[in-house]
């Protein structure tokens, strides 16, 4: 009798009795660099903004591994930050790797011939389109129909079931939406070019151990806090919460919080120039950030313009733009540029995210 085939295992399969595999998901930005310096330099004392100190920042020790996902589309400053991180990890005896899913700025073309676009570009339709919807036959029932649409559930019924229960006779109608409709593509860059290649390597190295992913988010980014993708993976935020497996997630500890200004100050004390992690053509960049790039990093701005022009007609029936004004990036007039050239804003930083201007990027 042939032996039974071995049971298939999934990425989520693990042995909870084993010690966790700890990995720092390095993003190369301000907070992530501050977090890396904290454990790589074995810092025991960190100054809060009020001058007080806390001790034992990482009671369970350093991570087992640090990894950076390279989109091949960030500024030279980020490449320098990655080199610094690599050196710090080498000195601390922690393996550091760079993984990549390819060049985000030159995405592959699908087998169907469709150009892949993973960045949430702003769009304007160039062709009219028809949409079908359902509406009451009796115009006097429209008010009731709308009320049912706004109610998510009543007495255990869904919206569709409520409408059927209300016995409202409906009809299908087609409506033409003219060209010129504005929209935005779905954001896939983070998952495809950052999370996927990073976690693929983490799963390879972790074996069947549970996984702790350390993320460099500070207390001024509460909307970016999330749980892991499955029972095996748990996200940790050492700049916000107690880095301790026995601690309650969400419970503030005496080891934190640390805000972005704390991170900038600490890096400055270490003579490390903070970098902002964001792809050069990130659509979420602020007007000030665009103006700053155009003035101080013209090569990166040119790369952004080239990407903007390359993606203009990549989606049939639409024009795609990097800038939210939905005009060619090369022709956008940045009002902040005038203020910067007149030195009205000296070394100002208008972003609290430390990464892309809206803080969307990251695991």
Image: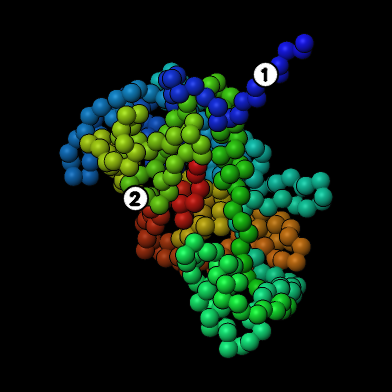
Nearer to us in this view, 193 or 287: 193
Q: Nearer the viewer, mark 2 or mark 1?
A: 1
Q: Quadrant of the N terminus?
A: top right
Q: Secondary structure at mark 2?
A: loop
Q: Is residue 257 visible?
A: yes
Q: Which mark is residue 120?
A: none
User: Residue 280: x percent and y percent?
Assistant: 57, 50
Looking at the picture, the colour scheme in use is: rainbow
74 lies left or right of 154: right
User: Residue 330: x percent and y percent?
Assistant: 62, 62
User: Residue 242: x percent and y percent?
Assistant: 30, 34
Residue extending farthest top = 1
288 lies left or right of 1: left
Q: Residue at the spot x=56%, y=76% of the render?
A: 166
Nearer to us in this view, 77 or 53: 53
Q: Is residue 286 above or below residue 107?
A: below
Q: Residue at the spot x=70%, y=61% of the render?
A: 312
Residue beneath label 1, please?
6
Residue beneath label 2, please?
220
Query: Whole-Å distance between the Cαs marked 2 and 1?
Result: 48 Å
């Amino acid at each position: 009798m042939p032996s039974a085939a071995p049971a298939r295992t999934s990425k989520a399969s693990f042995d909870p009795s084993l010690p966790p595999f700890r990995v720092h998901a390095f993003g190369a930005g301000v907070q992530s660099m501050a977090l890396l310096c904290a454990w790589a330099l074995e810092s025991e004392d960190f100054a809060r903004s009020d001058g007080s100190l806390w001790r034992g920042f990482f009671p369970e020790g350093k991570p087992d591994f640090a990894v950076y996902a390279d989109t091949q589309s960030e500024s030279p400053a980020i490449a320098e930050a990655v080199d610094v991180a690599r050196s710090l990890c080498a000195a601390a005896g922690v393996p550091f790797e760079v993984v990549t899913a390819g060049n985000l700025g030159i995405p592959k073309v699908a087998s169907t011939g469709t150009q892949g676009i993973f960045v949430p570009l702003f769009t304007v339709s160039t062709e009219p389109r028809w949409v079908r919807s359902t509406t009451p036959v009796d115009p006097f029932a429209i008010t009731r129909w709308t009320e049912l649409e706004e109610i998510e559930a009543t007495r255990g019924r869904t919206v569709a079931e409520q409408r059927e229960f209300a016995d409202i006779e409906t009809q299908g109608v087609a409506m033409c939406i003219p060209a010129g409709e504005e929209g935005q593509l779905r954001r896939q860059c983070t998952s495809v070019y950052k999370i996927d290649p990073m976690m693929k390597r983490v799963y390879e190295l972790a074996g069947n151990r549970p996984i702790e992913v350390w993320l460099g988010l500070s207390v001024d980014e509460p909307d970016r806090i999330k749980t892991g993708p499955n029972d095996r993976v748990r996200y940790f935020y050492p700049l916000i919460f107690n880095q301790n497996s026995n601690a309650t997630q969400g419970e503030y500890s005496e080891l934190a919080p640390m805000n972005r200004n704390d991170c900038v100050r600490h890096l400055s004390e270490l003579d490390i120039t903070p970098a902002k992690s964001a792809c050069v053509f990130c659509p979420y960049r602020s007007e000030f950030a665009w103006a700053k790039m155009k003035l101080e990093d013209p090569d990166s701005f040119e790369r952004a313009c080239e990407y903007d022009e390359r993606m203009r007609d990549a989606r049939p029936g639409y024009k795609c733009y990097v800038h939210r004004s939905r005009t060619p990036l090369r022709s956008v007039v940045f009002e902040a540029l005038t203020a910067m050239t007149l030195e009205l804003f000296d070394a100002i930083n208008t972003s609290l995210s430390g990464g892309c201007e809206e803080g969307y990027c990251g695991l």
